[in-house]
Image (cartoon, grey):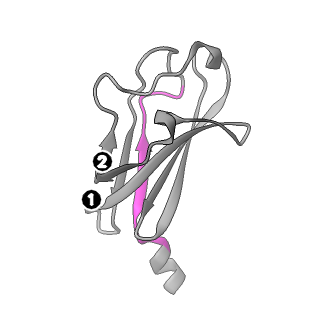
Amino acid sequence: MLELALAAAFKATLSAPTHRPRVNRPWPVAIRANDAAGHPIRARLTMRLLYNGIAVGKVDNGRVYTFVGVWREKKGQEIEYPTASRGQRLTFRALVTARGHTIKLNYWVRPR
């Protein structure tokens, strides 16, 4: 029962407009972190890109963000996929850490 309580220490979600972002265009992503009651909590975030499960890139050079409740890239600094990624199936991974636990949020993308 203790393991279930720890597993529910917090909830993280990722929302994005599409799995098929356009290359060289902004792709806005929102990451949320809430406690079991749905209240916003403080969390840390880092993002990576994977190809066949292997890390091939770090978003924002591997920067670690700290946020409360919802995180979004600043206007004009949204994630952009390079031309070389066109047609490649990638996994966008957000690692959200709070209360001593890390949740991996995976979202497949195929830039067009």
- In the rendered view, would you say 60 is above or below 35? above
Q: Outermost residue toward the bottom?
A: 1
Residue 9 is covered by the magenta coloring: yes
User: Circles 2 and 1: CB distance less than 8 Å?
Assistant: yes
- The residue singled out by tag 2 in the image is 70
Circle 2 crowding by C-alpha within 10 Å: few under 14, some 14–19, many from 20: some
Circle 1 crowding by C-alpha within 10 Å: few under 14, some 14–19, many from 20: some
| Amino acid beneath label 1 | Pro
From which residue to which does the magenta span run?
7-19
Please give the name of the residue rendered at 71% of the width and 42% of the height, measured from the top-left corner: 53
> Seen in the image, is 76 located left or right of residue 100?
left
- The residue singled out by tag 1 in the image is 40
Please give the name of the residue rendered at 29% of the width and 68% of the height, measured from the top-left corner: 37
Residue situated in front as seen by the camera: 13 or 41? 41
| Amino acid beneath label 2 | Val
Coordinates of residue 102 in the picture (x, y in percent) = 50, 62
Coordinates of residue 90 in the picture (x, y in percent) = 64, 31
